[in-house]
Image: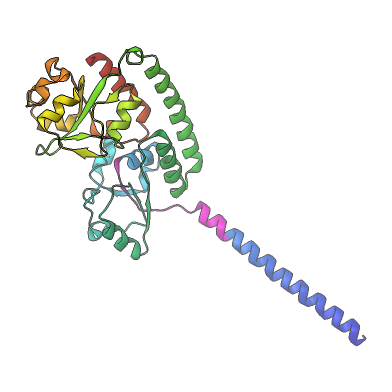
Amino acid sequence: MSRRGFDIHRRRIVVGGVAAVVGMAGLNSRMAMAITKTAAPNRVIVIGGALAEIVYALDKSTMLVATDTSCTFPAAVLKLPKVGYQRTLSAEGVLSMHPDLILTSAEAGPPGVLQQIRQTGVNVVSFTETHNVDSLRKKIDGVARELGAMEDGAALRKRVDAEWDNAIKNVAASPLASRAQPLRVLFLLNPSGSQPMVAGQHTAADAMISYAGARNAIQGFDGYRSLSPEALIAAAPDVVLTTDDTLAVSGGAAAILGTPGFASTPAGRNSRIVSLDTLFLLGFGPRLPEAVMALNRQLVSAA
């Protein structure tokens, strides 16, 4: 064989060998990606009631090893070990459950604790909350992706979207929609029985009041604040909305409406107060369409 022929032959061998190696690397890469996409976690902790509801709605509750105390629905979740309250977690308590995935709400913390947990190598996935139906859709998609349940997630989204369309149609056809002036609703929160707070803008309560066809009687600030009796009178709510927990620790509807300020509002004078379960009303989980319709019905009855 000539020197030129030998060089050509050698180049063919080298190029062929490189192609084989590259091809094998590509195959290995695709196999690794396939494994990554299909591998599901084995020990999951959920921090946040809406996220736990989504896990159960996806029929993936067997992956759960613990939740925080805000997870109260469905009833089966109450039997799981608890790692404390979502805002006051401890790294030791969470890590003692040996999780390989932690799904957290935007309220989970303190931030330093979550960072400490991440530094151990545990996958911590946090979900933002914007108190609207799009936020719910993103939570469903995100939880389904992390649990390797994309088909179940798509089915759940389809169901929730259909229920949401029905809820919005029902609200639009309700008596609240034909009022000359929107029903003014004040949301009161006092789960500990110590300091009553009212909901301003950019809160779950504010969003729910609007979705249900009414108007938040409290305007001018974001988040939650305590209000003076004079400010409550000026807000002039037609109805007071609260949670079942707040109603219980406050001594009932009569006790709330009889306090200074409330007694001089349209809601107080007409004994108009309604309550719903905290997670159901404010959770923005898969039961959101049902919660919107339930709130609308209660407001219609109270008005």
Q: Nearer the viewer, residue 299 or 45?
A: 299
- Residue 58 in sight here: no
Q: Nearer the viewer, residue 23 or 290?
A: 290
Q: Where is residue 126 in the image (x, y as percent from the top left)?
A: 37, 50
Q: Which of 207 and 170 is in front in this view?
A: 207
- Residue found at x 25% / y 60%: 91
For residue 89, what is the image quadrant?
bottom left
Residue 290 occupies which quadrant of the picture? top left
Name the image colouring: rainbow
> Measuring 64% from the left and 62% from the top, which residue is drawn there?
27
- From this viewpoint, which residue is outermost toward the bottom? 3
Q: Describe residue 215's horizontal placement relative to residue 141 as left or right.
A: left
Q: In this view, does 136 lie to the left or right of 198?
A: right
Residue at the extreme right = 2
Q: In this view, does 133 lie above or below 18?
A: above
Magenta span has 43? yes
Relative placement, left or right, of 134 versus 297 is right
Residue at position x 25%, y 39% from top?
Answer: 223
Image quarter for residue 31? bottom right
Q: Give the range drawn in magenta.
A: 32-49
Q: Name the residue at 24% across, 26% down.
A: 217
Q: Which quadrant holds the N terminus?
A: bottom right
The image shows a total of numbered marks equal to: 0
Residue 171 drawn at (x, y percent):
37, 19
Q: Nearer the viewer, residue 295 or 90?
A: 295
